[in-house]
Amino acid sequence: MSRTAWLAGGLLALFALPLVAGEFYLNLASQMLIAALFASSLNLLVGYAGLTSLGHASFLGAAAYLSAWLSLHLGLAHWASAPIALAGTVLTAAVFGWIALRATGLGFLMLTLALSQVLWGLAYRWVGVTDGDNGLRGLTRPEPLGVAIESADRFYWFALLVCLLAIGLIALFVRSPFGAALRGTRDQPRRMGALGFDVWLIRWLTFVIAGFWAGVAGLLFIWYHKYVHPSALSLQASAEVLLAVIAGGSGTLAGPVVGAVMVVFLKNFVSAYVERWNMLLGFVFLAIVLFLPEGLVPGMRRLIRRVKS
Amino acid sequence: MTSSTTPALAIEHLRRSFGGLPATDDISISVAAGERRLIIGPNGAGKTTLFNQITGDIRSDSGMISLFGEDVTRLRPDQRAHRGIARTYQIITLFGRDTLEHNIVLALLGLSRARWSMVRGLAPRSDFRDRARDVLAQVGLRELAERTVAEVSYGDRRRLEIAMALAQAPRLLLLDEPLAGLSREERATVQQVIASIPRAVTLVMIEHDMDIALELADSVTLLHYGRVIVQGSRAEVVADPRTQEVYLGH
C-alpha cells in the first residue's frame, strides 16, 4: 500500500471518528489534537533547530490567558480576541527569543525555563488580571462561519481541521529552503555562517514561528476547556510537551504527534484505571529512551527496516 | 570604488589574544587581486586564528581587515560571505547526514534570497539541483552527487569542501590545509582542483605540504608566534634564513 493511500485512509478514519466514538473518546481525541499541535510547534525548536526549550508552555498559556482576558474583561468577540491574543503571543515569543537566544545548549534551556517561570508567577500572583489560583472561567466557544462547536463531535472536527492545516503548514515550512537552512544551523552553525546564513536570525524567526503555533494550540486549549489556570504555563506543562517530542521522535513530523497522543492517553485514559499513572508515564519514557533512544517513530522505522532486510 | 590596484585583502595591525597570550600579533598583510598567497608557519603560529579573524568567526582585538577596499572588520561571518569571502576548514566541516548535492545546494542557497522562502519546497527546485551538479562536476564528484557525506572517502570530502566554497562564487577563497590527511593520489587530485580555480578568485592557503603548496603559490607569508616573520615571493621566502630557522629547518 502506497504512502498516499495510507495517508488518505488515516485522514478518512480521523474524520469518521465521531461516527463511531462516544463523547468521552471524542473529547480525549480533541485533547490529543491540541497536544499534537503544541508538540509539533516545540519540535521546530527541539528537532529542527537543535534548541531544547523548557518554557514552551509560556506561549500556549499566553494565548489562552490573553484570549480569555480579552473576552471576559473587554467583552471582545472571538473573531477579535483570537487574532489579538495570537499577536500578543507572537510578541511575547519575539521578546523571549531575543533574550533566550543569547545562549545555546544548556544556557538556552535555562533561559527559557526562567522566562516561563516569570510568566507562570505573573499568572499566579497578578490576581487582578488572572484571578490567581482560581484561573479565568466562564468562557464560550467561537462559532466559526456561524457553526456552533459546543458539542464534542463538532469541536473535534473543528480542532482536526485546524490541526491538519497547521501541521500541513509546518510540514511545508520544514521542507522549504528556510527549513533546510534551519537544519543546517542545527548541524553546523559555524559553517552556515560562512555560507552566508544569519544563524541568529534564522533561530529567532523559528522561535517566533514556534511561539505562533503554540499560540494557535493555546486558542484551541481555551476554547476546549473554556477555562485557564496557571498550570497551563507551568514547568510541568513545558516538561510534558518536551517529553512528548523526545519520546515520539524529534526532528520528524510524525514523532511529536505520536508522542503527544501517547502522553494524553496515559494522562487521561490510563489514569482512570491506574492510580499511580505518573509512575507508569515515567516507566514508558524510560523504556523509550533505553530501547528506542531516537524516539518512537524513528525507532520503529529502524526496527521495520531491520526486519525487512 | 575599487581600482585595479586595490588589494583583494588588506590586513592592518591585526591582533587577537586568548587569556593574555597573543595568537595573532600586529599582523599586516596585503594580497593582490588574483594572487595565490601561501601562509606557512609552525603549529601554533596563528595561521588558523588569522583565517578565523578574516572570516569573522573570531573577533579581532584591534586592527583592520578590508576586502577589495571595503572595511569588513566589524561584519558578521555571513555578511562577509555575502561580500565574497569563502573558506574551507582544517577540520572538515560538512553536513554528514546529507547528500553531496544537498551540501552544495546549501552553499548556493546561502547567497540566494530564496534562503528566506518558508513555503516553496526545496526538493523540487531543479535550478539549485542542476547548479549543484555542475559544481560537483567541476571537482570530479558529479557521480557521487546522491551519496551521503558519510559514504564517501576523506579525499572526496576535502574536494566537497572546496566545491562548497566554489559554489559561493567567491572573490577571496581561504583554504585551510586542503591537503591534510590525504593519500598521494588524493593530493594530486586536490592539487589539480586548486590549480584549476580561475584567477578571478584570489586564493589564500594554509598548507604544510611545501612541495605542492609552493607550486600553487605566487607569494608566501611566514608566521611565527602570531607575527609575520618573512613575506615575499616564493623564492625570496624560501631563501630567507629565518624561514629555514623557524619552519623549513624543522
Image: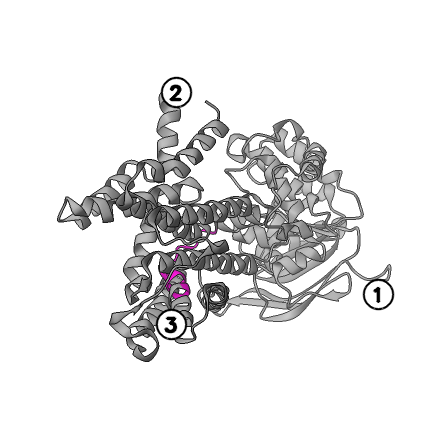
Residue ID at (29%, 43%): A262
Image quadrant where residue A29 sits: top left
Which residue is found at the position 39% from the left and 62% from the top? A107
Q: Amino acid at mark 2?
A: Lys
Location of the C terminus of chain A by quadrant is top left
Give the mark toward the camera: 1 or 2: 2
Q: CA distance from mark 3 to mark 1?
A: 62 Å
Q: Which residues are magenta?
A: A49-63
Amino acid carrying label 1: it is: Met
For label 3, the residue is A72
For marks 3 and 1, give the one nearer the viewer.
3
Q: Is residue A122 found inside the magenta-colored segment of the image?
A: no
Reading the chain from its start, which is encountered first: label 2 or label 3? Answer: 3
User: In the visual, does B33 lie left or right of B155?
Assistant: right
Where's residue A152, x and y in %? Answer: 33, 49
Q: Nearer the viewer, residue B235 or A153?
A: A153
Query: Mark number for residue B1?
Result: 1
Give the class, few, some or many, for how many residues have Cα within 10 Å of label 3's Cα (few <14, many ≥20). some
Check if mark 3's residue and mark 1's residue have beta carbons within 8 Å.
no
- To which quarter of the image does residue B74 belong? bottom right
**Amino acid type indicated by mark 3:** Leu
Residue on which disc 2 sits = A308
Left or right relative to A128: residue A104: right
Q: Nearer the viewer, residue B16 or A253?
A: A253
Residue appearing at x 47%, y 31% in the figure: A8
Q: Is residue A62 magenta?
A: yes
